[in-house]
Amino acid sequence: MAGKKPRLAVWKFASCDGCQLSLLDCEDELLAVSGAIDIAYFPEATRGEISGRYDVSLVEGSVTTAHDAKRIKDVRARSRVLITIGACATAGGIQALRNFADVKDYICAVYAHPDYIDTLATSTPISDHVKVDFELRGCPINKKQLVELVSAFIARRRPVVPPHSVCIECKLKGNVCVMVAQGTPCLGPVTHAGCGALCPSYNRGCYGCFGPMETPNTKALSGELARHGMDAKALKRVYGTFNVNAEAFREEMKRHGS
Amino acid sequence: MARKTIKVDYLNRVEGEGAFKVVVRDGAVKSAELRIFEPPRFYEAFLRGRSYMEASDITARICGICPVAYQMSAVHSMEKILGIRLSEPLRELRRLLYCGEWIESHVLHIFMLHAPDFLGYDSAIHMAKDHGDLVKKGLALKKIGNDILNLLGGREIHPINVRVGGFYRTPAKRELAPLAEKLKWARDAALETVRLVAKFDFPDNERDYEFVSLRHPNAYPFNEGRVVSSKGLDIAVEDYDQHFKEIHVEHSTALHSQIVGRGSYFVGPLARYSLNFDKLSPLAQQAAREAGLGKTCNNPFRSITVRAVEVVYACDEALRVIADYAEPDKPYIAAEPRAGIGCAATEAPRGLIYHHYELTADGSIKSARIVPPTAQNQSTIENDLTSFVAGWLDLPDTELQHRCEQAIRNYDPCISCSTHFLHLDMDRG
């Protein structure tokens, strides 16, 4: 790709802006990154128009409106590689709690004029709508993984983003197990790595913000959590957060009550 | 030119999705609308039934730019219900955490979002080609805010270490020492930033605002104090709902706030500064004077200078907290949940943020209400456009449009936040 820099675009759907902020939080890498690639569309950071095609699109946020369901198809058509960043784009985000409730009730609880509000009954991940080339986990994503991912796609190599559990990260870090040693309930055994075992490093149980790992044994973990004092209501809550619509967490949540 | 419509369909360099439209007829501004079309996410609805312990982690996700503000207003509300009084070291650590967020958020806005307007670039990345050292300094300064959040919060976005009653883990005094070294550099860099931005060319636009912020007898406000205004309001946070109301208008998924009987008001750095100048550290006061600011400031275009002064203060205050820090006996004060109603207001980088919760006996949330700063400023932003545009009608279209965008960016509007709220004080006829 000598001569022409790859074009990058950053798109936002329903989200908190935190994952795209991770790009601006790469204080040490940002200028190097912007030297290697052309940040062609990134409305949070720059004035500029949508135009032509992009080599890499980073997509933040979930699809919650009919307009956005159409817009993501246009984004896909303009993108050689489409990467979702974060739990909203990858699993639907915490706003996917509406998928298990009555959205009319939600609207009425928040807005005085429900008729002004235009929204879908569900919050869905990008992969429910278009083909996704890579999904980066986390609420929020880990910025080091983001830099790795963008570098890998520019170099057309496979990104190094391990799919194992948070437990492995604790062991690599030398943490004492908070569940075994302190009796603190922890989702680490079923949660996708990437945060660096942050919560256990701060004497707290993992709360699953990176979503389920590959083939998690949630049922076995729930038994263990129940032995640590969590009742059905607590179990339902613990799986029903930022990755509630990721299949393994969704199904386990449903097992503990609707 | 009898008819004219200035319209921008997607505001850039703001956090979230917004647009604006100003309609001019026969040389007069007929209407100005700041449209917010962030899709609603219904936080106040799905908080119902969650545990009081989850509110800080969940509400943090309303905004990736100022998660600490949400966490602080949430845990302080819960602590009021549970009757928890924080020990002094825990109180101080929460101030330190907020210093980190102010530095990170203000510096992001000053260098990455706002300065390009004054220096004539589309973005900080474009600006870096001609002003590389400036952008590098901004990034280095921002990183020190993030270093505080990383150490004390675990990570810069959606920190994991805040809990009801204190923190999950509190740092040892020696862990804070390396931060102090960096903060000394940051304080000098912040002073240089004040000098730099004070030289920008500011349009001469002032209005008679009603400023609203917290005020505390012995500190520049973060987590505590009464809600006061420049027009005489002085109330306990518990009386907030008697004096403020939210209105749902058709062009916005964010609710508009008003002071009962008086209308729009202004929250954020300009309001905090103008109501609390006497509580700034001597160094921050001196920096403000040297930058040509008075004890109050009514020109929203100068907010970039006021933000820089607050960065000086946040560095100074962080250094004070670190120097005075005595490790607490325990990382948090434990308490059993109980039924009750509690509210708290704290000072987000963008201004006052109010949370209100009702809990049942087992600590489940029965109702939640969150009023973020940008919602409170929305009417004021629209009034600024209406008032200022009349004086700018001779400008060429592209320049006029850009000036309007700047008038909105003065508020560092966080549109992601502004839509996430909610209100149960319903107007159903």
Image (cartoon, helix red, strand yellow):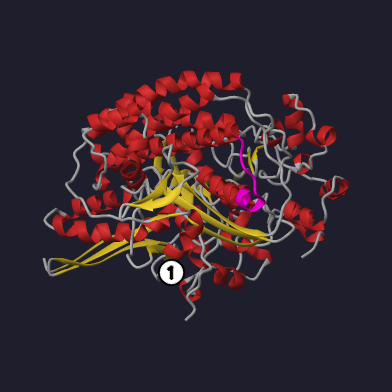
Q: Indicate the quadrant where residue A206 lies.
A: top right
Does residue B408 appear left or right of residue A214 in this picture? left
Q: Chain of mark 1?
A: B
Q: Nearer the viewer, residue B126 or B110?
A: B110
| A205, A90: nearer the viewer | A205
Q: Residue at x 29, y 29 (%)?
A: B287
**Image location (x, y in percent) of residue A86:** 59, 46
Residue A184: x and y, percent?
Answer: 79, 39
Asked which quadrant contains residue A245, the reply is: bottom right
Residue B106 in view here: yes
Where A5 falls versus A105 (above or below)? above
The percent position of residue A165, horizontal first and vertical second, equals 75, 37
User: Which residue is found at the position 50% from the left and 74% from the top?
Assistant: A114
Looking at the rendered structure, the number of numbered marks drawn on it comes to 1
Point 65% across, 59% down: residue: B340
Residue at the (48%, 34%) spot, across then down: B100
Q: Is residue A241 left or right of residue B344?
A: right
Q: Is B221 above or below relative to B18?
A: above
Magenta span has B81? Answer: yes
**In the image, is B97 to the left or to the right of B367?**
left
Q: Which residues are magenta?
A: B78-87
Residue hosting label 1: B248
Residue A238, placed above or below residue B241: above
Q: Say which of B46 and A29 sits in front.
A: B46
Residue B65 x %, y %: 48, 44
Residue type, mark 1 in image: His
Circle 1 residues within 10 Å: few <14, some 14–19, many ≥20? many
Q: Which picture quadrant has residue B218?
A: top left
| Horizontal side of residue A114 vs B258, given as left or right | right
